[in-house]
Image: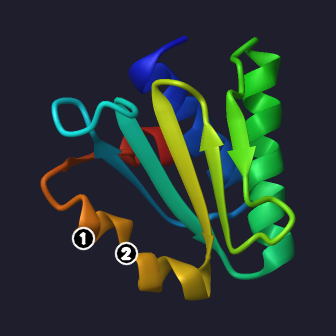
Amino acid sequence: MQGEALLELAARAADEKKAEHIAALDMRGISLIADYFLIAHGNSYKQVQAIAREIKKKAQEEEQEVKRLEGFDEAKWILIDLGDVIVHIFHKDERHYYNLEKLWGDASHVELDTVLS
């Protein structure tokens, strides 16, 4: 599983745990780190952890390697490296501060409406 399929898997998993303002950025040609960034937030530290846990679980069920998971204990900003997709799950207070959508403003947004409907 690569690229868009992995992005959709992570977006659905985040949505299942009621992640808010789920956004995806197409990083191809902009960053060498990954093809896509998925960005979302939770309203509490427990919810942020639950979202991250669900994404990790769904990826592993599909035999996708979780290369790295950072920030889980603190739960202000959890980063999940799925290879082609980097997932950023923020606590709502942190998301506005870091504002990755603005930082990576050159990246186009990927429509997730069909995935999250």
Q: Quadrant of residue 66?
A: top right
Q: What x and y, as percent, mark residue 56?
A: 77, 37
Question: At label 1, which amino acid type do we have?
Answer: Lys
Could you tell me which residue is drawn at 44 percent across and 84 percent down? Answer: 96
Query: Foreground residue, 95 or 113?
Result: 95
Query: Foreground residue, 94 or 10?
Result: 94
Q: How many marks?
A: 2
Could you tell me which residue is drawn at 48 percent across and 21 percent down? Answer: 5
Horizontal arrangement in the rendering, residue 4 relative to residue 11 (left or right): left
Q: Which SS class for mark 2?
A: loop
Q: Are marks 2 and 1 in contact (CB under 8 Å)?
A: yes
Q: Which SS class for mark 1?
A: helix
What crowding class fits label 1: few (fewer than 14 Cα within 10 Å), some (14-19), or many (20 or more)?
few
Q: What x and y, as percent, mark residue 105?
A: 17, 61
What crowding class fits label 2: few (fewer than 14 Cα within 10 Å), some (14-19), or many (20 or more)?
few
Q: What x and y, as percent, mark residue 70?
A: 71, 51
Q: Which residue is mark 2?
A: 99
**What coloring was used for the rendering?**
rainbow
Question: At label 2, which amino acid type do we have?
Answer: Asn
Horizontal arrangement in the rendering, residue 78 relative to residue 99 (left or right): right
Horizontal arrangement in the rendering, residue 101 relative to residue 13 (left or right): left
Q: Which residue is mark 1?
A: 102
Alpha carbon separation for disc pair 2 and 1:
6 Å
Could you tell me which residue is drawn at 16 percent across and 31 percent down? Answer: 29
Whether residue 117 is visible to the viewer of this picture, yes or no, is no
Numbered circle sitting on residue 1: none
Horizontal arrangement in the rendering, residue 101 relative to residue 48 (left or right): left
Q: Is residue 67 above or below residue 22?
A: above
Could you tell me which residue is drawn at 31 percent across and 47 percent down? Answer: 25
Whether residue 103 is visible to the viewer of this picture, yes or no, is yes
The quadrant of the rendering that contains the N terminus is top right
Q: Is residue 4 above or below residue 51?
A: above
